[in-house]
Amino acid sequence: VMYNIDFSNIKKERKTFYILFGFGIVFFIIMILILGSHIIKMKSMDSEVMSHRVSVKSSSGSEGETMYSPIYYYTVNGKEYACSSSSSSTSYPNTDNAIVKYNSNNPSSCVSKYTENSMVLLIVFMIIPIILLGVSIFQIRKINKKIKALKELNISMKKNGGNELLRKNSH
């Protein structure tokens, strides 16, 4: 009698976690690039000024809801600039004047406090790919141990003709 435990289904399960791992890596790289570009932009903002006027831009969201985004107006060297937020929300934003950070070499390059606060959300989203990577690594290691144990059992059963397994089950 030839004994051979088939573990092709376990290998398919492992492949699924390798795919999940790949998605996690891609998602993580994308999030790092986005976060990095935000950090580089924030580093170039070497000056700040209080806005003197705030307006709100409204637009239609992907599901038909109204999205709001503040526009902060500020003056540098007698010239007025507008700092539009790169993020928007379904809730109406605060229209109080706020500090606007800008690049002194290019005052039209700016970041509002509203946009700066959205970076916190970006950092929170970094947790998602980290969880994907952690779960997939844990599962892949667990499956690899299972495959190794089954391979050893196959070898043992081939050597002993399955008698060792029968002895263990009869006790």
Image (cartoon, rainbow, N blue to C red):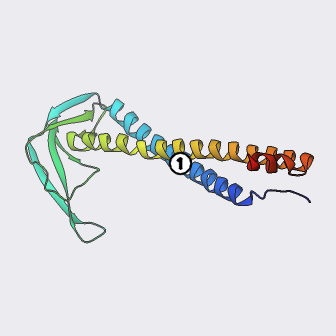
Q: In the rendered image, which quarter contains the N terminus?
A: bottom right
Quarter of the figure with residue 142: top right
Question: Going by the picture, which residue comes out furthest to the front?
Answer: 171
Residue at 23% x, 34% y is 101
Quarter of the figure with residue 10: bottom right
Rendered position, 90 above or below 81: below
* Residue at numbered disc 1: 24
The picture places residue 53, in percent across and down from the top left corner, at: 8, 45
**Residue type at numbered disc 1:** Gly
Near-viewer residue (89 or 37): 89
Residue at 9% x, 48% y is 95
The picture places residue 52, in percent across and down from the top left corner, at: 8, 41
Residue at 24% x, 28% y is 47
* Mark 1 element type: helix
The picture places residue 170, in percent across and down from the top left corner, at: 76, 50
Near-viewer residue (109 or 32): 32
